[in-house]
Image (tube, rainbow, N blue to C red):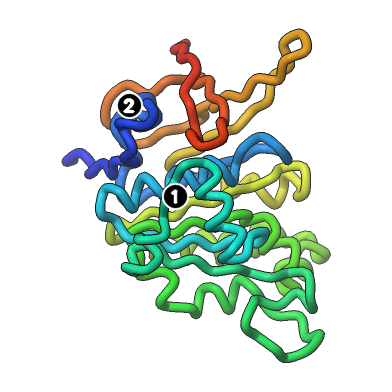
Amino acid sequence: MSARHIHSIGLESRDRLNEELGGGIPSGSIVLLEGEYGAGKSVMAQRLSAGFCETGLTVTYLSTELTVRGFIDQMTSLGYDVVDDLLDERLLFLYASLDSGHSLSGDDRPRERKRLMERLMAARTMWTADVVIVDTFDAILRNDPRFEALVRQNDERQAALEIISFFREVVSDGRNVVLTVDPSTVDDDIIGPFRSIADVFIELQMITVGNEVRRQLAVKRFAGMGEQVGDIIGYSVRTDTGIVIESRSVA
């Protein structure tokens, strides 16, 4: 079987993340970035979006937390200038507002809870990009009434399999789907199937050493890797710099 093409995550003059991940993300991958609040999931997703755009790939970024203005301000504070990418339509940013009637931004039908995943899957323009990032995916699941109904019926696996089938179709022609998840907000029975099928599964961890909190990427799975990928990759987040690789160890 021929090796899968590797999508570089760019910004090699800025940090060593692309090198530490073996040269990039294999095309046609479902990528799961998992970590609790404060672990850096969104920052990592934002770093990936900036890097993919730098390499010439198109990116759709769906956020459940940031408006367009908030996204631009956040990226600027990290030193990732994506204004030109937005203007040139290399980067499509979408804000999913879940606080008002649990509906997506732009839908003004009051108080009617929507089948969020159904609507997202039907939004064809969103899925035409080379890379689609959903940040945070667990918020979409928790606010989808159909998914909730299946969970109440103890049919979490069926609910997950329907979504997974759609993601597999998206990545079948080489696109990548990146999902960020906070495992503390959903049961293991819900997130388990997504962990199982992820081609790239990375856990963002916070380790307390004395009075210092250190962040690290724990690579749980990396199918179709290019070069060697670190099992544990230490990193920090700095203003005006973004992601900085601090250390690397291989088991």
What residue is shown with label 2? Answer: 19
Q: Nearer the viewer, residue 132 or 156?
A: 132
Residue 116 screen position, x and y as percent:
64, 74
Question: Taking 205 as reference, is 131 above or below it?
Answer: below
- In this rendering, position of residue 172 left or right of residue 202: left
Determine crowd level at label 1: few under 14, some 14-19, many 20+ residues with C-alpha closer than 10 A.
many
Q: Which mark is residue 11?
A: none
Quickly name the residue at label 1. Answer: 30
Q: Nearer the viewer, residue 212 or 121?
A: 212
Q: Position of residue 237 (x, y in %)?
A: 57, 31
Question: What is the quadrant of the N terminus in the image?
Answer: top left
In the structure shown, which secondary structural element does the residue marked by tag 1 occupy? strand
Residue 197 visible, this angle: no
Q: Position of residue 188 (x, y in %)?
A: 72, 44
Amino acid type of the residue that numbered disc 2 sits on in the rendered structure: Glu
Q: Residue at x 62, y 56 (%)?
A: 137
Q: CA distance from mark 2 to mark 1?
A: 20 Å
Whether residue 179 is situated above or below residue 141 in the rendered picture: above
Left or right: where 228 falls relative to 45: left
Q: Residue at x 54, y 63 (%)?
A: 62
Callout 2 environment at 10 Å: few (<14), some (14 to 19), or many (20+)? some
Find out whether the residues at labels 2 and 1 contact each other: C-beta distance under 8 Å.
no
| Number of marks in the rendered image | 2
The residue shown at (81%, 85%) is 111
The amino acid type found where label 1 is placed reads: Ile
